[in-house]
Image (cartoon, rainbow, N blue to C red):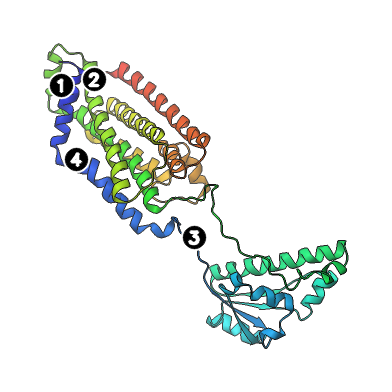
Amino acid sequence: MNIRTITWFELRRMFRSRAVVFNLFLLPMLLIFILGTALSSFFGGMEDYVPEQVKVGIIGVESGESLPSSFRTFIEAPEIAKVLVPSMGLTQKEAESKLRTGGIDFAVTVPEDLDTQIFSGGKVQLEMLLGKNRTRNLIAESMFGAFMDEANSKQAQAVIVGPQVLTNSSSAVNERPSYVETGKLNDQGETYSAVQYYAASMLIMFLLYSGLTASNSLFSEKENHTLYRLQSTPVSSATIFGGKILGCSVVTVMQAILIVVGSSWMYGVNWGDHVWLLMLVCVLITMTSMTIAIIVSLVTKTASTATAIIQAVVIAMTFLSGGFTPLPVDFIQALGEFTVNHWALQGILRMMLNAELSQILTCVGVLGAISLGLSAAAMIAYRKVGYHA
């Protein structure tokens, strides 16, 4: 009997268990679908954000023709007209009343001499009244702020060059600069969807959870008193121990392949173009999972204690790394950088976004260093404690 024989019997034992097959292969695919569907609103996916329409009350102006030319040009710009819906002829009291009742979302007072201020080099200011909806307030403030920035840039030109530069140019009044620009957050113009995010997160979490299978296998031999029989054969304890860990590792790698291929085929998850780096990350997570299981199994006395510790460690690392939902708290994010999940998740997400290779290798390098450190700790624990009945 050698290590290959023990590995083969370990694989047969694991695949006979329906619970193992369900937990390792079917449950992650189910959770990816549920979380990716239920929490899709928290992720932008590949769709551009469409601003809400904002009803804006224009105070003290009876009609559009009464507006200063520069402001009328701004409010009639196609990209602005899609978002800001003006309501003319309101007094200050009427605007405040409609803001309270929700009749309008935002109100602004436009100076009658706005064009004169721009041409003479005076500072341009608009009096703005906020409504109840924070998002719509932010949209309106940003757009009117863009108008004032543009107008004040003309004011700066008038101060430096002189008013004639604006008199001889139509850009101050008639030209319509672009106040809205659509873009992406990363250089490649790509982002990940909720399904992609949770496919990566669940892949990492379940690969780490596979250490529970190894731990239960090691304890089952002791509790069923079959370890005495194995050790009575001409096989060393190291061979028995190594065969069981190798068998669990093979199943874990198969689990990773199924999650990657299955999520790509069933849910359309794009794992990026760095296939070999993705495989390396999965192997490193598998090593980390097995070494955690080895350390915990060797220093604890019962299977229930080992299971509780491994579950607590995996859940805590998944939470701190944002595996369940992205965490906005800076302190928790800082703690997440000390977890295996953080570096694995960031590495996989960068692969999905086709980020620069140096960024991906940084995450993979840290993950590799953690795996080697835990492997060294597992070897030390095995030499001191050993695996015996």
The numbered mark, 4 or 2, whose residue comes first in the sequence reads 4
Q: Nearer the viewer, residue 234 or 298?
A: 234
Disc ID at residue 48: 3
Q: Secondary structure at mark 3?
A: loop
Residue 98: x and y, percent?
Answer: 57, 83
Query: Residue at image x 87%, y 62%?
Result: 161
Q: Say whether marks 1 and 2 touch (CB < 8 Å).
A: yes
Local crowd size for mark 4, using a 10 Å CA cut-off: few (<14), some (14–19), many (≥20): some
Residue type, label 1: Leu
The numbered mark, 1 or 4, whose residue comes first in the sequence reads 4
Residue type, label 2: Tyr
Q: CA distance from mark 4 to mark 2?
A: 26 Å
Query: Residue at image x 40%, y 39%?
Result: 341
Q: CA distance from mark 3 to mark 4?
A: 40 Å
The numbered mark, 1 or 2, whose residue comes first in the sequence reads 1
Q: CA distance from mark 1 to mark 4?
A: 24 Å
Q: Which residue is mark 2?
A: 387
Q: Is residue 313 visible?
A: yes
Relative to 206, does residue 230 appear above or below in the rendering?
above
Residue 243: x and y, percent?
Answer: 22, 22
Relative to 222, does residue 98 appear above or below in the rendering?
below
Disc ID at residue 21: 4
Q: CA distance from mark 1 to mark 2?
A: 9 Å
Can you say which quadrant of the picture contains the N terminus?
A: top left
Q: Which residue is mark 1?
A: 227
Q: Tell me: 32 left or right of 160.
A: left
Relative to 162, does residue 57 appear above or below in the rendering?
below
